[in-house]
Every structure is written in C-alpha cells, then in structure tokens.
Amino acid sequence: MLIAAIIFSCGCIVVRHKTVSEEVTTLNLSPKPEIPMSDKLVRSKKGDIIAFLPVDWFFVNVEEKASSDVFAVAVNPDYTLSAVFSSIRKNDLTDSLVSKEGLLGLARTSLNIHENKTAGAVKQVGKYSLIQSGTMSFAKYNYSNSSGALITQTAVFKSSINQYYEFALIPMNISGKPLPTQIEIDKIFNSIIATIQY
C-alpha cells in the first residue's frame, strides 16, 4: 500500500502539463521572399487567400488522388519538394480551440488530422512556433512519418473571412535526386510564407 502511494504521489509530481510559453517559440520573418518567386498564383476555392510559387515550380493535378480539402499542389523541377495548400474544415471543436488558443489551437488540430489519417504514423518533430511575416500571422510545426528522415514543415493560418488553411512543404525521395539542403528548404518555406496574403 505504501509503495503504491509513493508511486502514485511521484507520478503526480512528475506529470506536468506544458504551458504555452514552454511549447512555443516566436519567429519574425521578412515579409519579402528570400528566393526568386514566379507569377504562378495559388488561390483558395473561396478566393480569400493567395500565394505565389518559386521560379520554375509548377502545379500538378492530383484531384483524383488527394483529399477534397487540398486545392493546390506544386513541385520543384527535381520532384524533391512539394508545396501543398489545403483548407482545414471548420467545426465546433476547431472553432472552440482557435477561440481559446488562437493559431496554436489550429496547429494542434492540423497535426491531429495528419495523425488520424496515418493511423498515428505521423510524429511531431520539435516544438510549435508562431510566425509573424509583415502583417500576416501563422503557427508552424514540423512532422515526420519516416522516423525523422523526411521532415514536413507546416504553417496554418486563418483568412480574413475566418476560414482555416494549411500550407505544407513536403520533401520527396521519388526521383532519386538529392534533397535540397535544410537551409535551402527553409528559404523556400519562408519565401512561400512571405507571398501568402489573406
């Protein structure tokens, strides 16, 4: 009985909920892209968000293969990176989370969607962060479904008409060509973020 009480009390001491300040870092990004961007326009179905693609990137048609929430997919010429733009469906739970936690709640919802779609194969890498790019605000997180070998960077945001969106930059190893360096991937991610307007 005494041992059970000690284990129980130790468990209570050790178990601790993380506070928002422990989980989140804040990043201020330049509102200008770090790499050359094209005039190829990404536009949501409702027309409430736009973004631009890097030079030489192009759209691919995945309508029959992708979720109905995906409205644009683009790849780089080497097929080593893919930019995926999708909407996050509104419901009472998501609205409640966003109301309480802001974009962090939306990021948690987005990660949960990916975890559910992959039966838990997706794992978060690192911490959540909040991004300010000019007047635009985003929450960011990274995840992997390949034990950390390929890390997807994801940003979520809310449009001016209160719709929820996600932009993900996904590394791919389908072409056999080497992936860009992490510095190059970060520059591409930040540059696309810099073009998003809502």
Image (cartoon, rainbow, N blue to C red):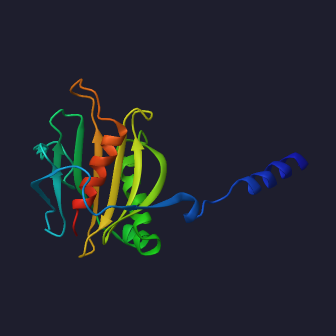
The quadrant of the image that shows the C terminus is: bottom left
As drawn, 11 above or below 195: above
Q: Is residue 59 above or below residue 47?
A: above
In x, y percent, where is residue 58? 11, 44
Q: Nearer the viewer, residue 101 or 2?
A: 101
Question: How far across and down, in percent of the image, does residue 121 sit?
Answer: 42, 39
Q: Position of residue 18 (x, y in %)?
A: 60, 59
State left or right for residue 74 relative to residue 18. Answer: left
Quadrant of the rendered structure where residue 74 is?
A: top left
Query: What residue appears at the point 58 percent right and 60 percent down from the top-left corner?
Result: 22
Q: Position of residue 101 (x, y in %)?
A: 46, 70
Residue at 27 percent across and 34 percent down: it is: 172
Left or right, 4 with respect to 18, comes to: right
- For residue 180, what is the image quadrant? top left
The residue drawn where x is 23% and y is 28% is 174
Q: Quadrant of residue 76?
A: top left
Q: Residue at x 37, y 72 (%)?
A: 95
**Residue furthest to the right:** 2
Q: Nearer the viewer, residue 36 or 119?
A: 36
**In the picture provided, is 103 more to the left or to the right than 82?**
right
Q: Nearer the viewer, residue 190 or 104?
A: 190
Figure label count: 0
